[in-house]
Image: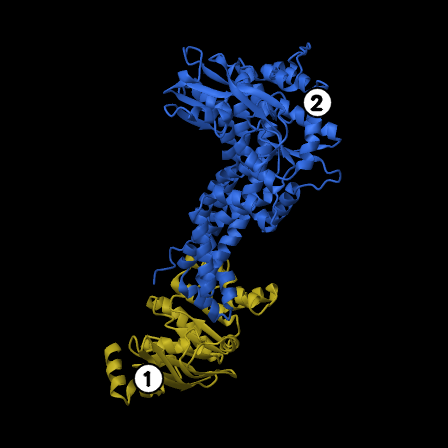
Amino acid sequence: MRADQVRKIFDGHAVLRGISLDVARGELISIIGPSGCGKSTFLRCLNFLEIPDSGTVDIAGVTITRTGGRWTRQEEDAAHRLRAHVGMVFQSFNLFPHRTVLDNVMLAPVRVKRMPADEARAEALALLDKVGLSAMATRYPDTLSGGQQQRAAIARALAMRPDVMLYDEPTSALDPELAEEVLSVMRTLDNEGMTQLVVTHDMRFARAASDRVVFMDGGEIVEADDPDRLFVAPEDPRTRRFLRSVL
Amino acid sequence: MKPGLMALLLALVMFLPVASHAAPLRWASDAEANVPFVFHDPADQSRLTGYEYEIAQAIARRLGRQTQFVQNDWDGLIPGLQRGLYDMVIDGIEITPEHEQGVLFSRPYYMTTERITVRRDQQGLDTLEALHGHVVGTLKDTTAERMLQADPSISIRAYEEETNAYTDLKNGRLDAVLLDGTIALYYGSPDPDLKLVGAPIGQVAYGVAFAQGNSVLRDQVNAALDGMMRDGELHRILARWKLWTPAMAALTGDASTPEIAPDAWDHYRAATAPTTGWRARFDRYVSFLPLLLHGALLTFAVSACAMVLAVGLGLALALMRRYGPRWLGALATLYVEIVRGTPLLIQILFIFYALPGIGLRLSPFVAGVLALGMNYAAYEAENYRAGLQSVARGQIEAAIALNMTHFQALRFVVVPQAVRMVIPVMTNDFISLLKDSSLVSVITLTELSQTYVRLSSTYYDYFGTGLLIGVAYLLLGLPFVRLARLAEARFHTGRQRQGHI
């Protein structure tokens, strides 16, 4: 997975000032930085929930290069192909409230991939088992705790068999003990070789679980390094200032 | 959705006009509350009767044709004629210069005069001049109305239904009623609280109405009427209804006075005699049931089909406005504004009577469903728009991130949630649609409300019949309320935790 010189301007204000990042297969990368630094926008540009103004995104062989101008039909088709390789998990879970947990997980494989319902159900149940929710399959999302909902959301994303998982502050809405349920699922996936990008405020997780940590500020990547080096001996004064304020 | 579609198709098949091989003589009248012209026999509501009904049958017999009766609302009779819904209208239509501008008339088949009816205890109001300064009822757009208009001091109440005029006279809202002798004889004179006073006033001639230019049929009917006058058939019919008048003798040159029993008049009087005792009353209400059932079925069929249309079209409009390209959204907005800004009654009449002008001929049932459905679609569209807006943006993002197309996201994620949210509002709208469906009576459909008009005016019983009809509407509405409750309960997935971030 590769991002090259991704730029995004909102209302004349540059949110992303040319972000480039190469991610190796199986890497777990945490993206940290102060609020408004553009880290969530960057993540959302990777699966084109936000349309970058310029730059290249290349995931699992699908390459989209933007050079300004209108978002075309062809580009949307390419984005659709690209999203087949990318799963996403949101801060507010965004489970479908009108469907059971099982149906949430099955919906996209059945409707998008045209997978037979039996097969989709079996896979969904296996995924729910994996995230520890097999007992909750027939419940509606609003009857679950936040941690359970977020694990269901992860199972839902995994059901599309992505190559890359994007997490947009997955634990920010959760109490610490519930957050831990979610983080442990992410660690399990890391062990299985899943490529994961996590925008997070959880410094403990970023430091303990990441292969690399990216620090962003003012729409730029300030520093990207091994967590032990970045947290212990950051090179840039901005990184140091940020870490001092949050640790 | 499938059962709904089935019902729609079934209803369409049931109500499509049946093509016939022998080209019967299609004639129209308003048989609701229309004694003694054309009306449903009080003793057997499934049977049409009336002196004009018999004249129509006699004409057809002489032309060697079968008849096909078309029920239409009084106001729609002439437009329907011009539309070609039927070949002729027989409904006590007065031959006046104004009417002659719109239709072609046969020679008069009946002559009568205007009569004043007052309350039994009333004194003195027995001439046109004596009505000076009083409140007088009549039917709108008639010779009687024009006579009253000649004296500006008379406060005129012009009614659609003669029964309403006489009821208001009894209730003291009117001082007198001026109407054709035929009507006065049947509505005014039998009533113990009312009396006919004074001498006959003026003269009115009724003619069969045809579309402009249909002089072929007009000439045939004239010939038939001539024959009926010559051989006494017209005399016999009118005498049986107690309607033979000196003016008719003058018109036909038939001065004979054969012994003809007024059996039709007697039959009518016997069937409508005020019932005494709850037993007789109960029996009468039971005899209404088949008619009520028929009206209720039609009301239900029209409403259900219109609802299916309203929900589908409403959703489409809402989606166009929210997610469609700008021009399509503007078009949908225009539609909603126009439909919401004009009366439903006008829309129904427009679709039924005006669209044939551009080559779109719809059966009354289809036109009614279309008008109601398209009207309610505008309101449903607004509901759905609110529903769609209330579905969180994150829901679409989650769907897109799961590699759904925008269409799939709408279909599987957004719309189902919006629908669940608007169900309570929709239930209200549907019950109101059920009631608004009464408006389709103006395009020849005899649904529940029209059944009320017919029954209550036949028996002068607005109270008991009204209660019956009210119960029928409530029973019809109940399944919808119940259905909506069930749906709400089933869809109730609660959104209490949804926004707690």
* Residue A220 pos. (x, y %): 33, 84
The C terminus of chain A is located in which quarter?
A: bottom left
Q: What residue type is disc 1 on?
A: Glu
Q: Residue at x 56, y 16 (%)?
A: B280
Residue B228, label in figure = 2
Looking at the picture, tell me which residue is in the foreground, B42 or B382.
Answer: B42
Q: Chain of mark 2?
A: B
Q: Position of residue B155 (x, y in %)?
A: 38, 25
Q: Disc 2 marks which amino acid? A: Met
Q: Do the residues marked 1 and 2 share a common chain?
A: no
Q: Is residue B41 visible?
A: no
Left or right of B19: which side holds A178? left
> Which residue appears at 49% of the width and 75% of the height?
A76
Q: Residue at x 52, y 53 (%)?
A: B313
Q: CA distance from mark 1 to mark 2?
A: 103 Å
Of circles 1 and 2, the one toward us is 2
Query: Furthest-bottom residue in view?
Result: A235
Residue bearing the label numbered 1: A220
Quick check: can you spot residue B217? yes
Q: Is residue A1 above or below residue B26?
A: below
Which chain's colour is blue? Answer: B
- The chain painted yellow is A
Dot 1 falls on a residue whose secondary structure is strand
Q: Nearer the viewer, residue A46 or A96?
A: A46
For label 1, count other residues whose C-alpha is less than 10 Å away and answer few (under 14), some (14-19) or many (20+): many
* Chain to which mark 1 belongs: A
Q: Is residue B239 above or below residue B352?
A: above
Q: Are marks 1 and 2 in contact (CB under 8 Å)?
A: no
Relative to residue A154, is residue B239 drawn left or right? right
Q: How packed is label 2: few (under 14 Cα within 10 Å), some, or many (20 or more)?
A: many
Task: Find residue B102 and report its horizontal and vertical position in percent.
Answer: 56, 37
Tally the numbered discs: 2
